[in-house]
Amino acid sequence: FRAGAAACRGMHPGSADVAIPDDYVPVREATLFRRTFFSDGEDAGSWARGGGGDGGARPTGVAAAPVSTDGNVEGAILALRTAEGRWTEPVGQALEMAAYLAARELDRARRQFQAHRYLAMQEGFHRLIRRTAEITENADGDGQENASPRRDVYRAAVEQVRRQLDAGRVLLIEADPGGKRGRIAWESGGEGAADREEKVSLKDTYVEWVLGQGVHRIFSADSAAAGRFPVLPPAWTGARGGGRLLVPVRAVADGFHGVMVCEAGEGRNFDGRDADTVKDMLAIMRMGISHALRLENLEKEAKNDGLTGLLNRKTFCAQLANVLSRLDGRYPCAVVMLDIDHFKKVNDTYGHPAGDEVIRKVSSVIRKTVRKVDMAGRYGGEEFVIYLHSADPSHAGQVAERLRLMIRQTRFVFEKREVGVTASLGFACYPGDGKTSEELLHHADVALYRSKQGGRDRTTAYMNQ
């Protein structure tokens, strides 16, 4: 605002476009001492602004008046006279009136901007709150497989922050508990919008520093790449040119812990108000995550067996029917039924806590044996059921036998006595042994019964005879 206005009879045309240096004494005197600077005649010649051109002409009169709002000096209005003669009108009073009018207009414009910014910020908060509520409401009992309300909350928060700050790129980084490694939970801008499952090292980056210190960090456009450490890991570094803002996300219980990184467009910087805006947005995000976690836990309790963590019978049967409906006879698969032998004897001899321990350990063996594409559930009591994806009879028999042997080798200690258990298994294959979930489960159960009738501790394939 140093040369925000310049008015003087006899000025050189276009001289208002000439930059005023920071150390230019008339402006510095006006702003530093908060009074009008005035020089006329030969004394004014020493206040030429440069070494040549119109900007370097020797002035015959110089005046500067400070522009102040709310007691703060915002700049100055400068008048330069280069024509012959002397000031012929009360320039000081005119400049002071112009400075007063400029200050009033500047204050009005600033208040309008602040009001607009406040309204936009409140609108952004309300939009994020509404969107977060919609996400968690839609996730409550929607029945969709692999639905992730937390992921949708991440996306809503990141995209709203980017819109609110007019940022070029925003990253939400989820860190491990120790803060040494992390992944991008959601990214908006740059190459698009997505999350990344792969984790990278955060060591010796300012992301690690912000995580450890728990305070935000602002980098200007000039210093964004000149710090002691890189701001981001090399794999995540995007286009540079603007400032960067890093804000830590306070850990949610059993949920999110990380940093939000905002990258400005070229030539733009962030300030403390931007950091406060992001913190408020993150507070809303944390509430959304907490609610999403509660929904996920409720859904897990509804779908999983409380003792083993495996799918319960109802959920397993529903998901098996869903999988078979999509296969349409194109790929083989198998269902394995497993029953712990003489389980009642364990309960009667050592008590129900011992029986629970056997069930937990057997379920752990099952969990380690099946693949991610498979499913395992507790069918009831000491009986388990397993779905093997893309498994022909040969492969299904191998998996079942491996399970049987691993269970047989598992040892338990009850009342200072080492005890072992065995299991009987039966399996049926799709589509030869059945095309519906009911048929496969029934035939696998028939094969299991034959294993028990044959002496237990064995695996039997269903044979339609």
Image: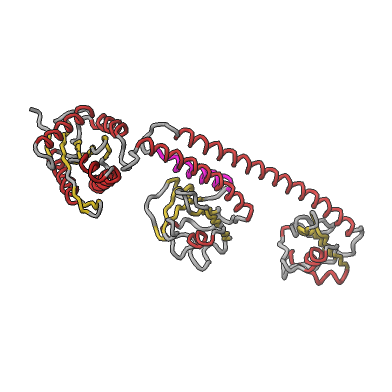
> What stretch of residues is rendered in magenta?
147-165
| Residue at the spot 60% in from the left edge and 49% down from the top edge | 277
Location of residue 76 by image quarter? bottom right
| Residue 408 belongs to the span the image colors magenta | no
Quarter of the image containing the C terminus?
Answer: top left
| Residue at the spot 74% in from the left edge and 46% down from the top edge | 111
Q: In this view, does 151 lie to the left or right of 267?
A: left
| Residue 148 belongs to the span the image colors magenta | yes
For this rendering, which residue is in front, 203 or 81?
Answer: 203
For this rendering, which residue is in front, 247 or 361?
Answer: 361
Q: Position of residue 432 (x, y in %)?
A: 14, 30
Quarter of the image containing the N terminus?
Answer: bottom right
From the viewer's perspective, is residue 75 above or below residue 406? below
| Residue at the spot 53% in from the left edge and 50% down from the top edge | 168
Residue 361 visible somewhere in the drawing: yes
| Residue at the spot 8% in from the left edge and 37% down from the top edge | 454
Q: In this view, does 64 lie to the left or right of 409?
A: right
How many labels were placed on the picture? Answer: 0
For this rendering, which residue is in front, 221 or 316?
Answer: 316
Q: Magenta segment, principal secondary structure?
A: helix
